[in-house]
Amino acid sequence: MHYQGEPHPASLKRSIVVPVDMLPLKNEAAVHKLILLAGPRWSPMPSADAGVSGLDSWELGYIKIACESFPKASQNLKWASDTLDRLVKEANVRNLV
């Protein structure tokens, strides 16, 4: 969001939206575990503000991670990216097949 130079608390918020299909997951068990770990951050359809066109078809849904806890926008984006990396890493460990 951009507020035309006006200070606003939400101006530091950053979010990322990623199709689950594009994540480096090992197998279907990892996909299932990721969706469980993501909880309410997972959705079968992208949110309206995700910037995702309806032209691409992703079967496994989307994960949206947002942060506005830090004083700089770059720190919020880094946290969201690191959180996604940790989710993927955890989803790929100890899968029971």
Image (cartoon, rainbow, N blue to C red):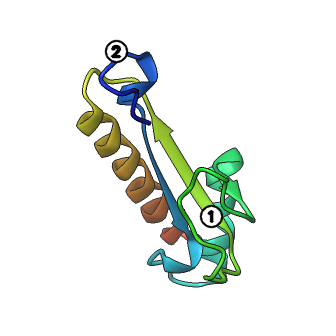
Asked whether residue 96 is in view, the answer is no
Choose between 70 and 94: the one closer to the eye.
70
Question: Callout 1: helix, strand or loop?
Answer: strand
Residue in view at x 70 percent, y 81 percent: 59
Q: Is residue 32 above or below residue 67?
A: below
Q: Which residue is mark 2?
A: 7
Q: Amino acid at mark 2?
A: Pro
Query: Relative to residue 76, is residue 90 depicted above or below?
Result: below
Say which of marks 2 and 1 sits in front: 2
Side of 50 where 6 appears, left or right: left
Task: Quarter of the image for the N terminus: give it.
Answer: top left
In the figure, residue 12 lies in which quadrant? top left
**Residue 52: x, y in percent?**
56, 66
Q: Which residue is rendered at x = 68% and y = 69% of the image?
A: 61
**Nearer-the-camera pick, 36 or 65:** 65
Sequence order check, earlier mark of 2 and 1? 2
Q: Position of residue 58 (x, y in %)?
A: 65, 80
> Label 2's element?
loop
Image location (x, y in percent) of residue 65? 51, 47
* In this picture, residue 61 sits left or right of residue 22: right
Residue 55 on image: x %, y %: 63, 82
User: Where 68 falls versus 78 (above or below)?
Assistant: above
| Displayed quadrant of residue 47 | bottom right
**Mark 2 residue crowding within 10 angstroms, few (<14) / some (14–19) / many (20+):** few
Residue type at numbered disc 1: Tyr
Badge 1 local density, few (<14 within 10 Å), some, or many (20+)? many
Residue 12: assigned label: none
Per the rendering, the mark at residue 62 is 1
| Observer able to see residue 75 | yes
- The residues tagged by marks 2 and 1 sit, at their Cα atoms, a distance apart of 31 Å
Q: Identify the residue at horizontal 42%, vertical 63% (top origin).
A: 89
Q: Would you say 57 lies left or right of 12 here? A: right
